[in-house]
Image: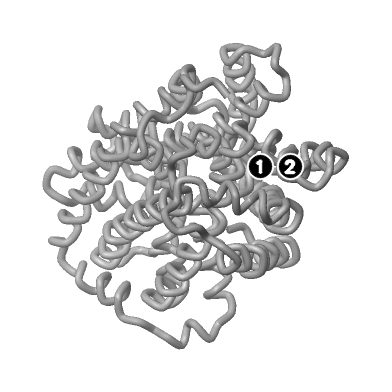
Amino acid sequence: MDKKRNFTSRWGFILSAVGSAVGMANVWGFPAKMGANGGFAFLVAYLFFVALFSVVGLSAEYAIGRRSRTGTLGSYRNAWASRSEKLGKAGGALGWLPLAGSMCIALGYAVIISYVLKALFDSVTGNLMTVDTGAWFGAFSGNDYSVIPFHIIVVVGTLLTLLMGAKSIEKTNKIMMPVFFIIFAVLAVRVAFLPGAVEGYKFMFTPRWEALADPMTWVWAMGQAFFSLSVTGSGMIVYGAYLDDKEDVVKVATRTAVFDTIAAMTAALVIIPACFAYGLDVGAGPALLFVTLPRILQDIPFGQLFAIILYTAMVFAGVSSLQNMFEAVGESLEHRFPKLSRKMVLVLLAIICLGFGLHMEPIAKWGPWMDIVSIYIIPIGATLGAISWFWVMKKKDLLSEINKGVSKPHGSLWYLSGKLLYVACATILCCVALFMKIAF
């Protein structure tokens, strides 16, 4: 691993990791699931899983990447090779599945960011403030080739930020993530003054404990925690590969989770009170961004300004997540095929993503595609990763990496939490997704 491509500071790493974890699903996914599954009761279950998954799952992915000093393919090979070289080859082959998950979700994600960029453009021109938002969204989301210029800007612009690896990822996220948090804090304050917003706060923070008796509340909370933290057996590994040996990976993973949770809660403090103020459906999904929120912004003073602020934040959230997906794939290809330069890999990714995007541009096509990815590829990849780290890789090798840079070494409690609880959660989520066909 070229040292020039390492992160230069702890906070640079954390902001980049938070950028990967804080995606657009935080904005519509977390509020929708919180609203549909008991409000504060759901939040309690969600925080339990975030704590577990960050301390053992996310920290393990960081550690695996740092140990192998490469991304998904090399890390799976390295983990399995701790048993034998023959198993190492098998692990390297298995690593292609979670890596495919990163690429597949990147393909669809880039299309949605193109829609967000379209919304930002129409906010700047003022067009969004005068249209029927449902008709406006339907006009471009249901037609082929409607946002090609925006899709090109998103894909090429994101890939350009990866030219210098961790260094350029760190620089861009040091700008994007603080701006994202500031923008959503501003929006949350503005929403607090909407008539009826207080009912949204009551809905969020009044515990309906009976919801915890429903197993699906726990399953939804588990799924949201898994994918909010990007613990999918692929993406976070490559960021760990750029992490210094002096860093405590458990502490860094915990801080990543804290900021990701703050982002999710801030989004909920914008979305849920706003929906209550206007009598709108909290669980509207992507339509929240493109139909519900624009309609609200049309009715408030300085709505155009707040629309520009909102969609700027969403572009930053989307691009920072897309960076991680592309980097996971790009670095693995560089490692697997050493003759490929970084520029060649990025050009290849651009061709694939743009070609796919032209075919999958309408959201009617994107939705089923992302359902397939989130039902099959990602849950299986996350489960493969969990089993690889805690059941295949030798315990002493994993603990040796986890305990670099720590003041108090982690031992059997940390390891058994991963081997039993974390792997069980990943397996349950995978089985629910596969057999109940639920997209998380």
Examine the rendering and report whether any part of residue 139 can be seen.
no
Q: Residue at x 59, y 29 (%)?
A: 357
| Left or right side of 246 for 171 | left
Task: Please give the residue where the numbered disc 1 appears in the rendered image.
Answer: 101
Q: From this viewpoint, which residue is outermost toward the right?
A: 86
Question: Pointer 2 and pointer 1: residues touching (CB < 8 Å)?
Answer: yes
Q: Quadrant of residue 283?
A: bottom left
Query: How far from the left and from the top, in percent, is residue 188?
Result: 21, 55
Which residue does the numbered mark 2 point to in the structure image? 97
Q: Position of residue 167 (x, y in %)?
A: 42, 24
Q: Residue at x 62, y 12 (%)?
A: 341
Rendered residue at 30%/75% (across/down): 205
Q: In the rendered view of the protein, which quadrant contains the C terminus?
A: bottom right
Q: Judge by depth and name the residue closer to the eye, 425 or 367.
A: 425
Q: Is residue 119 above or below residue 152?
A: below
SS at mark 1 in the image:
helix
Amino acid type, callout 2: Leu
